[in-house]
Image: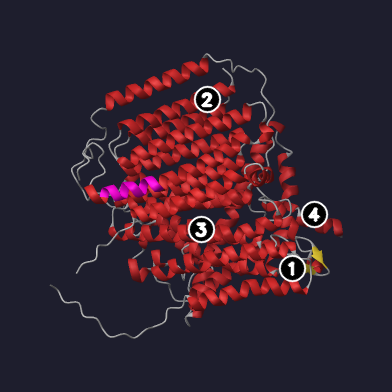
Amino acid sequence: MNVPFIILAIITVVGTAAAMGMRNAVHCVLALTVGLAGVAALYLQLGAQFVGFTQIMVYVGAVAILAVFAIMMTHSPEPAKPPTFSSFWTVGSVVAAAVFAVLAWAIHSSSLATHTLPPQPEVTVQQIGDALMHRFVLPLELMGLLLTAALIGAVVIAMNHREETK
Amino acid sequence: MNLKLNQLDQIFVIVNHWLLGYLPPAVRPLCSSILSIALIIVTFALLFAITTVLERKGLGRIQNRFGPNRVGPCGFLQPIADGIKSLTKEDIVPNPADHAVHFLAPVLLVAAAFMAYAVLPIGRNMILVDLNAGVLYFFAIGSLMELAVFMAGWSSRSKYSLLGAMRAIAQMISYEVPLVLASIVVIMQAGSLSTVSIVNMQATYTGIWPHWFVFTPWGFAGFALFMIAATAESNRSPFDLPEGESEIIAGYYTEYSGFKFALFFLGEYIGMFATSAMAITLFLGGWSAPFSFLTWIPSYFWFFAKLLTIILTFIWVRGTLPRLRMDQLMNLAWEFMLPMTLLNLLTAGVWHFMSAGVLRWLICGAMVVVPCILLSRGLKQRKKFQVRKYHFSE
Amino acid sequence: MNSLQNYLLLSSLLFSIGLAGALIRRNAILVLIGIELMLNAANLNLIAFWRFGPNPAALTGIMFAIFSISIAAAEAAVGLGIILAAYRHSKTTDLDRMNSLRG
């Protein structure tokens, strides 16, 4: 329970809660960016440098921009503002609160209380590359295949299929 | 004599240690960081000021006119006048604009631009943080700048801003791919993502020639591709369609005035310096001297000499080449530079596994030059003259 | 309350916030963002267990998290493509109004 963890946790939770609660969609995505940057900082605090920087590069640098582009393209020009939350928001919040309650109770009552903090593991990028090339080479290749398929699929789905006029 | 030169080289480190000696040991790491950060900000802001006047005078001479020559000797105090002007201008924010995001956009841009300097080795033992994944950190921070550009364009609620922001982001995202791929060649060869070890690997000499990566076929191609992508990433001419004054007023910073505009300017230039410094680190040997008999000159001098050379080249290219159209820009990124970077990767692999000699140079040189010629010939749009088609309205 | 439990609580809080967002919001893109948030919470869980677990040298947690990040990015791209196509068809991103299969 040290101070950096508390600060980062507050930043992350406030950012993500704002992301889910704000009225303006672009504000939501920007708040999400803050929350995800907080998560990346938590990764750095845990010692996973590579994952932290990859998180910033992929999520903040790509997914957030994709989301704002999508919001801008689906933005109907100056409509009457629809209500922010859907009509059955009570059920949704109750379900989410119940999930959190169950998870928190499970964590609290588990026997994870190891009083000795394990030493900080020294991970170099070389080790990650080594693992990717030897032990995890099959998931790596499958990931390449998946990303190619997703790229082509997203372009085909979102493409403007112009009908041929006479 | 040798000891004196070594001290001159490490003078900043020595002064840092001496100053920290006056502080209790508990706060020493924090104060060391603060000192280094302050020094970096001051140095590169000063470099920004010098670059603005150099650019205006350089462009002026290329265009057969004088640049600014009123303020100070030969106009070199112009940045001070510019700074006072931008500080005293009225800060106009459009009424429908999103005030919070409008305010935060230049702040994020400048913050991200300055954060990139944390992993750049400015001299021997002079780096802010020696991260194990330094190059990855640099590119991750670079992708924050795109978000700032979008925030600026969207929050202004103006057609020019939005259009400029869309174009700018499309350009920056498209050129980020060749930028990263061009640097992966160096990472492959150096075997590490840490900028310090990449520079240390290039700081050795055979005879008088240094082992800079730019003096290999794949390194030269990589350097050229990296510099083109860096020009596009910083929205500089000939890739400055998002901010071209004759096309779109000022693009995504149309609705900014006064100090916020100056902050955008600052952020862009600082980003340009950071990318040039990364190019120097990856390809041009960082702080190492070009010849082995010149190593007595301090390392930071060589770093800034190389940086100034690249900046002058940027200014030269800006004054010389015409602006690229949006579709020409995107075609260049996806159809020319992406295949070239991938082929460059292949070339670097071949270079690594062949034994040293003339044959290696010939084969790798051919592997780089021939696709370049073929791709550029194949992508040249030939003007075809056709019978004119008439479209009548129904 | 030691460190591992703190991280797990934080990640379950993030997960439930993402779940709440995905269930409550009207805009389809924000539902997708909620899903991304849930994936991030799971990643945080993985990295926390890697750090405090018995065998950090095996790098399993980090690998899992890296693959999860790439899959999440791919899924975000495809999801946003689908939302764009659906918007083009029904002219709205309001999920409460997309409640009939007949276009």
User: Measured from the top left, where is residue B99 in percent x and y?
Assistant: 32, 46
Q: Nearer the viewer, mark 2 or mark 1?
A: 2
> Which image quadrant: the C terminus of chain A?
bottom left
In this figure, which residue is indicated by the disc labeled 2?
C8
Residue B176's label in the rendered image is 3
> Which image quadrant: the N terminus of chain A?
top right
Q: Do callouts 2 and 1 point to residues on the same chain?
A: no
Left or right, A34 with respect to A84, comes to: right
Residue type at mark 2 is Leu
Q: Earlier in the sequence, mark 3 or mark 4?
A: 4
C78 vs B242: above or below = above
Residue type at mark 1 is Pro
**Magenta part of the protein: which range?**
C78-87
Left or right, B295 with respect to B164, comes to: right
The residue depicted at 45 percent of the width and 49 percent of the height is A62
Q: CA distance from mark 2 to mark 1?
A: 53 Å
User: Measured from the top left, where is residue B332 in percent x and y?
Assistant: 47, 69
In this figure, which residue is indicated by the disc labeled 4?
B7
Q: Which type of secondary structure does the marked residue at label 2 adopt?
A: helix
In this figure, which residue is indicated by the disc labeled 1?
B290
Q: Is residue B206 visible?
A: yes
By secondary structure, the bulk of the magenta-drawn segment is best described as helix
Chain of residue at mark 4: B
Q: Earlier in the sequence, mark 1 or mark 4?
A: 4
Chain of residue at mark 2: C
B365 vs A35: above or below = below
